[in-house]
Image (cartoon, rainbow, N blue to C red):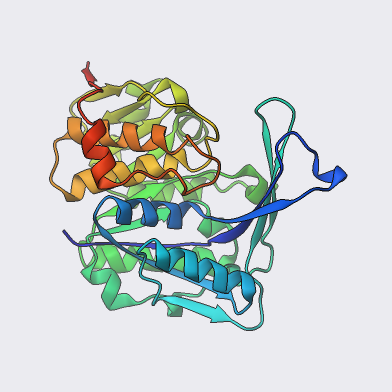
């Protein structure tokens, strides 16, 4: 089946008690969070192997992240411990209603010092898919060079690249990273993005226009456009499938897009049809919302098998 290779930053996530602003104190629950590692864990749960490339602080938080990744089956041999820079942190604050505020403390983190020399070139060349996101290249100049170097290694070995723009405006600050994100998208074979991200990058919310602009000048074979609780679309250049949302009891949408990615990529590596890939991606994404936290509701292969058949796709 081959191995998914991915790189990025996994942070320690501190989650505040529900309906209590941080300004009033209270307990914080510790978890891990990171788009790329979420997808890697999702792939492992779906019966595949995954390797994660990163840097962590040589500190207690870094050791916690390592233990969590290993416990979920992710290969961590390409993670370097940095004695000079800390593990990144994020804090999730529950606001009135169902809103959540996310505060990042990742500037100067160990992962932001990743370099092209950190890349295990031969492992990338042997991979089945290299999964990248638009988060890591905006963390620092060295991270940008590392992501593009990984993409070039994969391309030279004809390893397919999957890419999720994962636009985080808080990380963009006042810079316009859209051209760089479009560059990475054009290099990818599987482009997995949200509808709002498509509007930022391609200037439209109409699926036909988005698909036309993506497929006209890129290496993309499969385009997924995710629209949260409204479902998603899947295109292969000749047809578009409308994926209805899977049934779920949502608690926290964090990580749903990463779970969708894992479901889709696992289906691709399993040789599934476009319809089946879409179905299991929709299920994986929906079920990931049923608990708080990024990885706690990532679906297993057995659970997916039991749930499949309850969702249909609509071709148009």
Q: Residue at x 51, y 63 (%)?
A: 144
Splitting the image into 4 quarters, where does residue 93 fall? top right
Q: Is residue 200 left or right of residue 100?
A: left
Relative image position of residue 157 (x, y in whole percent): 21, 67
Splitting the image into 4 quarters, where does residue 286 fall? top left
Relative image position of residue 134 (x, y in whole percent): 49, 51
| 209 shown above or below 252 | above
Q: Quadrant of the N terminus?
A: bottom left
Q: Residue at x 50, y 75 (%)?
A: 115
Q: Residue at x 19, y 30 (%)?
A: 275
Seen from the viewer's position, the closer of residues 7 and 58 is: 58
Q: Residue at x 40, y 20 (%)?
A: 206
Q: Is residue 70 left or right of residue 86?
A: left
| 5 shown above or below 35 | below
Q: Is residue 153 visible?
A: yes
Q: Is residue 178 left or right of residue 131?
A: right
Relative image position of residue 256 (x, y in whole percent): 45, 38
Seen from the viewer's position, the closer of residues 158 and 62 is: 62
Relative image position of residue 98 (x, y in whole percent): 65, 28
Seen from the viewer's position, the closer of residues 181 and 129 is: 129
Q: Residue furthest right?
A: 24
């Amino acid at each position: 089946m081959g191995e998914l290779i991915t790189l990025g930053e996994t942070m320690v996530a501190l989650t505040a008690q529900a309906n209590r602003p941080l300004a009033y104190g209270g307990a914080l629950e510790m978890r891990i969070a990171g788009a790329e590692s979420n997808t890697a864990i999702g792939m492992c749960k779906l019966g595949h192997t995954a390797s994660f490339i990163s840097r962590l602080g040589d500190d207690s938080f870094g050791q916690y992240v390592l233990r969590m990744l290993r416990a979920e089956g992710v290969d961590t041999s390409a993670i370097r411990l940095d004695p000079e820079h800390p593990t990144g942190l994020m804090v999730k604050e529950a606001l009135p209603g169902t809103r959540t505020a996310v505060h990042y403390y990742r500037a100067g983190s160990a992962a932001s010092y990743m370099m092209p020399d950190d890349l295990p070139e031969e492992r990338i060349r042997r991979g089945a898919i290299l999964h990248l996101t638009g988060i890591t290249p905006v963390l620092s100049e060295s991270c940008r060079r590392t992501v593009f170097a990984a993409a070039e290694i994969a391309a030279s070995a004809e390893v397919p690249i999957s890419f999720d723009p994962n636009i985080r405006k808080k990380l963009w600050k006042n810079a316009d990273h859209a051209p760089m994100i479009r560059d990475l998208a054009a290099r990818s074979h599987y482009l997995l993005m949200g509808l709002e991200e498509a509007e930022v990058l391609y200037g439209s919310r109409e699926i036909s226009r988005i698909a036309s602009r993506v497929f006209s000048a890129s290496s993309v074979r499969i385009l997924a456009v995710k629209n949260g609780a409204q479902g998603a679309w899947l295109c292969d250049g000749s047809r578009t499938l409308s994926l209805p949302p899977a049934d779920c009891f949502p608690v926290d949408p964090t990580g749903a897009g990463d779970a969708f990615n894992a479901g889709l990529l696992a289906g691709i590596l399993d040789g599934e049809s476009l319809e089946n890939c879409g179905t299991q991606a929709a299920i994986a994404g929906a079920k990931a919302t049923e608990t708080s936290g990024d990885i706690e509701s990532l679906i297993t292969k057995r659970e997916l098998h039991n749930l499949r058949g309850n969702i249909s796709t609509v071709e148009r």
